[in-house]
């Protein structure tokens, strides 16, 4: 779309040159890297970055500590389960040993009862 104020090429060229000149002036007016305002802003950004890094490091340390505690808790729970399993196995073996120790006595008792029955049957 044509601008009605720019009638000729030379007018457009002059407007373009003045716009470029205005941009260059704006760029030159910007503060340099050694300007006190820029130095202060840079220091503020660095302070923010350092604080962020410290917070991140603290969060990471807390996360690692939580993981370590969880691992210790899991290990303690596994150890308790293993001890309980060992206790159940010892109890099972003790009951089996008791049954095995009682078995010959029971067999002998049954044999005696059988013999008494046979002897009592012959007496009749």
Image (cartoon, helix red, strand yellow):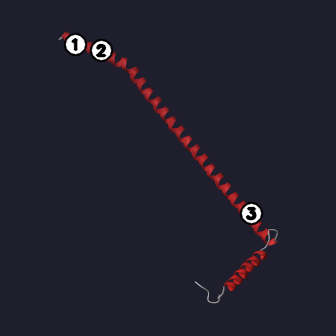
In the image: residue 8, left or right of residue 25: left
In the image: residue 116, left or right of residue 18: left
Q: In this view, does 105 lie above or below 32?
A: above
The CA span between labels 3 and 1 is 108 Å
Could you tell me residue 52's position as x and y percent? 69, 60
| Label 3 SS | helix
Q: How crowded is mark 1: few (under 14 residues within 10 Å), some or many (20 or more)?
A: few
Mark 3 = which residue?
46
Q: How many labels does the image show?
A: 3
Q: Which residue is drawn at 32% across and 17% down?
A: 109
Q: Residue at x 53, y 39 (%)?
A: 78
Q: Residue 3 carries which label?
A: none
Q: In which quarter of the image is residue 42?
A: bottom right
The CA span between labels 2 and 1 is 14 Å
Dots 3 and 2: beta carbons under 8 Å? no
Which marked residue is nearer to the observer: mark 2 or mark 1?
Answer: 2
Could you tell me residue 39's position as x and y percent? 79, 68
Which marked residue is nearer to the observer: mark 3 or mark 1?
Answer: 3
| Label 2 SS | helix
Q: Is residue 91 above or below residue 113?
A: below
Q: Which quarter of the figure is the N terminus placed in?
A: bottom right
Q: Could you tell which of marks 3 and 2 lies nearer the N-terminus?
A: 3
Q: Residues within 10 Å of mark 2 (few under 14, many from 20)?
A: few
Q: Could you tell which of marks 3 and 1 lies nearer the N-terminus?
A: 3
Q: In which quarter of the image is residue 50?
A: bottom right
Camera-side residue: 6 or 98? 6
Camera-side residue: 72 or 47? 47
Camera-side residue: 37 or 86? 37
Q: Residue 111 carries which label?
A: 2
Mark 1 = which residue?
120
Q: In this view, does 67 lie above or below 90?
A: below
In the image: residue 100, left or right of residue 65: left
């Amino acid at each position: 779309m044509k601008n009605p104020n720019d009638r000729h090429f030379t007018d457009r060229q002059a407007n373009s040159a003045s716009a470029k000149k205005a941009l260059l002036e704006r760029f030159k007016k910007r503060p340099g890297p050694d300007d006190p305002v820029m130095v202060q802003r840079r220091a503020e950004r660095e302070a923010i970055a350092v604080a962020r890094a410290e917070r991140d490091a603290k969060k990471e340390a807390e996360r690692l500590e939580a993981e370590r505690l969880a691992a210790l808790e899991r290990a303690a729970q596994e150890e308790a389960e293993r001890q309980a399993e060992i206790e159940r196995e010892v109890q099972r073996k003790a009951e089996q040993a008791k049954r095995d120790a009682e078995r010959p006595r029971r067999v002998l008792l049954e044999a005696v009862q059988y013999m008494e029955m046979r002897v009592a049957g012959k007496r009749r």
